[in-house]
């Protein structure tokens, strides 16, 4: 019940503190069984499940047959079949890492490793790291390490040992190559937070770490740079602001209107609404309807099941996501009305038309039809769109409403701007270009991306060649080719040396540079908001592909919600109205229900302070009291 407190104590006391009663996360226990099984695969259901999954992936790559189970679902099953983690297995992995040079960065960069005096200390430190990932607090654990060991505050680059699953599924497919299953390894991971190092490494070393095997060789996860570039080039036009998104905005707009109606229905039934679940639902609805062109009834039937499986929710049903994937892939491939901008006839006489007379519609489904990519690549891209396409956007909108609920004056100021926006429209529907009218809302969204980054981890890369980063005293330290790095957003976004003394305060009026402010509907709408201190969508060139769609849908949804409703923290969250949320784990009173961001599965949402999940894992929720603005008059 008090894992956070124990983790915090460990950060403050060092690795030689008293033993911690930690349990390892389910995914690590899973890997332990497969790495060192005690029974044959016929007797061990975990090994049998993993083998069946690997075989299904090989069929996907070679025949196009869609798998009966995704890795998200496999991970739901395996914790129910696995109960322990043997230290002997961890020690074997550690010995292997020590022998092949995987831990080199731990010796040249600051971090807690140097406090480890015994073998047991090293084991303990690795398990603490794994537990922090399972509890979704590793970003704060690392911030604590930076402050304790780094020498340069939150600008410190540090190295930590991690137990990770690296997958051969992230490599580009090749004929006859059977996929290499996930393999557990102990590695040193360099946590980059120096602003200059972070931007430079992110821009130059674009090869990903192979730690997202559950997304196959998709555009976000592939470790093959040529394969990534080919996918990126093909998918880019789906997310072009003027040529594509402006054309599908009417679909997004209709859902935003329906979103406001839906909230009215929910708030009539109960004044406290879980706005996290609500906005995640709406973000999933947006991408299914606007990007994929799925029927509304199909979206409603699959929305909750898809999201619960991605989140590892205890109520998730195995088989729902994989079946939805089959249905979506089938409908996308068979949709004869989907179009992308490149389908347009080239001559000016037919501007606004395409060969079949259909406008741009369901552009992502059309891209699936024309991509000529390997089936595993297409499947992985559909998974990442359904997952990250809703998760990051839904969380960001939830954090926006959380901060507005804590700041009634700011909420009223944003509502005033929203009212002026709709007065300007004078009864007509907004166009894409109209969204340029927002200023304060843009600033609130930008500050939310800084203060509560949905992708707090940033991005995971491996060095293409030896390169240097700053050490404890700012000296240049050379890292070998292949070093794994995590270019973390959390610490840079909360660094007072970069943002000033109010770095741990929510302030949308801060002095953002033009390159950092996110805008929509203007000539700069396609620009990635980024700087050396700020990279919510990662740095170019390997930045978030769907950021322009996310920016558009957030403004539509939030404007219609704030036009019609006011929000306050519900009773369970009232104690946190005036709380300060620092970068590192709290030194004291860090109990299991202390409010924070839960950073698990690659994205960060608000902690459910009322319920816990399997094995005491934190869940995500945010209850707000919702009032119609007409009721305030």
Image: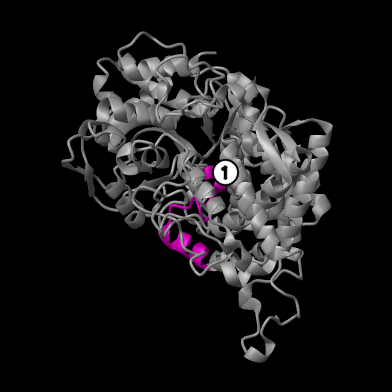
Mark 1 surroundings: few (<14), some (14-19) or many (≥20) residues within 10 A: many
**Spot occupied by residue 9 in the image (x, y as percentages of width and height):** 38, 15
Q: Residue at x 59, y 50 (%)?
A: 384
Q: Nearer the viewer, residue 326 or 347?
A: 347
Left or right relative to 128: residue 160: left
Q: Residue at x 65, y 80 (%)?
A: 344
Does the rendering let one see residue 450?
A: yes
Q: Residue at x 67, y 67 (%)?
A: 431
**Spot occupied by residue 451 in the image (x, y as percentages of width and height):** 47, 39
> Vertical placement of 1 versus 159: above or below?
above
Q: Is residue 344 magenta?
A: no
Secondary-structure class at tag 1: helix
**Spot occupied by residue 398 in the image (x, y as percentages of width and height):** 61, 40
Left or right relative to 114: residue 59: right
**Spot occupied by residue 340 in the image (x, y as percentages of width and height):** 64, 71
Q: Is residue 217 magenta?
A: yes
Q: Quadrant of the C terminus?
A: top right
Q: Nearer the viewer, residue 357 or 30?
A: 357
Residue extent of the magenta highlight: 213-233
> Vertical placement of 229 versus 148: above or below?
below
Q: Quadrant of the N terminus?
A: top right
Q: Which residue is mark 1?
A: 396
Looking at this view, name the residue that lies furthest to the front: 633
Place residue 8 in its image quadrant: top left
Does the rendering let one see residue 613?
A: no
């Amino acid at each position: 019940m008090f894992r956070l407190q124990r983790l915090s104590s460990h950060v403050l006391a060092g690795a030689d503190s008293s033993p911690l009663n930690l349990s390892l996360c389910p995914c690590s226990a899973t890997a332990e069984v497969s790495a060192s099984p005690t029974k044959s695969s016929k007797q061990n259901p975990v090994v049998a499940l993993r083998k069946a999954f690997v075989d299904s992936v090989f069929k996907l790559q070679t025949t196009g047959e869609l798998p009966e189970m995704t890795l998200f679902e496999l991970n739901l099953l395996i914790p129910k079949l696995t109960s322990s983690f043997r230290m002997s297995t961890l020690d074997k992995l550690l010995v292997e890492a020590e022998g092949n040079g995987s831990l080199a960065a731990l010796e040249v960069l600051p971090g807690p490793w140097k406090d480890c005096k015994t073998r047991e200390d090293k084991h303990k430190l690795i398990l603490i790291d794994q537990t922090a990932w399972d509890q979704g607090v590793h970003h704060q654990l690392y911030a604590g390490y930076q402050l304790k060991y780094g020498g340069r505050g939150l600008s410190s680059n540090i190295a930590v040992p991690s137990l990770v699953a690296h997958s051969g599924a992230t490599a580009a497919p090749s004929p006859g190559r059977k996929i290499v299953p996930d393999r557990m390894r102990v590695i040193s991971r360099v946590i980059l937070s120096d602003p200059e190092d972070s931007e430079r490494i992110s821009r130059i070393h674009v090869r990903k770490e192979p730690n997202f095997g559950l997304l196959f060789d998709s555009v976000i996860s592939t470790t093959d740079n040529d394969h990534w570039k080919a996918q990126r080039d093909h998918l880019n036009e789906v997310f072009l602001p003027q040529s594509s998104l402006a054309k599908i905005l009417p679909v997004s707009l209709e859902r935003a209107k329906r979103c406001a109606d839906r909230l009215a229905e929910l708030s009539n039934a109960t004044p406290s609404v879980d706005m996290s679940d609500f906005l995640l639902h709406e973000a999933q609805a947006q991408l299914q309807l606007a990007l994929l062109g799925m029927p509304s009834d199909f979206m409603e039937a699959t929305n909750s099941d898809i999201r619960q499986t991605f989140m590892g929710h205890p109520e998730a049903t195995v088989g729902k996501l994989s079946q939805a994937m089959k249905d979506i892939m089938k409908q996308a491939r068979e949709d004869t009305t989907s179009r992308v901008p490149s389908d347009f006839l080239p001559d000016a006489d037919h501007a606004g038309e395409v060969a079949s007379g259909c406008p741009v519609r369901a552009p992502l489904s059309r891209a699936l039809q024309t991509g000529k990519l390997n089936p595993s690549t297409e499947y992985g891209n559909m998974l990442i769109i359904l997952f990250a396409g809703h998760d990051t956007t839904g969380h960001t909108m939830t954090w926006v409403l959380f901060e507005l609920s804590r700041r009634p004056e700011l909420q009223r100021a944003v509502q005033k701007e929203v009212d002026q926006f709709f007065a300007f429209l004078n009864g007509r529907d907004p166009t894409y270009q109209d969204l340029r009218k927002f200023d304060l809302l843009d600033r609130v969204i930008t500050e939310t991306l800084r203060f509560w980054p949905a992708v707090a981890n940033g991005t995971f890369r491996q060095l293409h060649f030896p390169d240097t980063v700053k050490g404890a005293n700012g000296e240049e330290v050379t890292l070998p080719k292949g070093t794994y790095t995590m270019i973390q957003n959390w610490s840079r976004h909360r660094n007072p040396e970069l943002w000033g003394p109010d770095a741990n305060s929510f302030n949308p009026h801060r002095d953002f540079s033009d390159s950092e402010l996110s805008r929509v509907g203007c000539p700069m709408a396609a620009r990635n908001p980024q700087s050396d201190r700020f990279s919510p969508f990662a740095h170019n060139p390997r930045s978030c592909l769907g950021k322009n769609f996310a920016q558009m849908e957030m403004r539509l949804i939030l404007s219609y919600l704030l036009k019609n409703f006011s929000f306050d923290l519900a009773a369970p969250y009232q104690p946190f109205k005036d709380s300060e949320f620092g970068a590192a784990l709290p030194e004291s009173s860090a109990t299991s229900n202390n409010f924070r961001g839960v950073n698990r599965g690659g994205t960060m949402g608000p902690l459910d302070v009322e319920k816990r999940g399997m094995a005491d894992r934190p869940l995500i929720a945010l209850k707000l009291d919702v009032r119609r603005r007409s009721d305030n008059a």
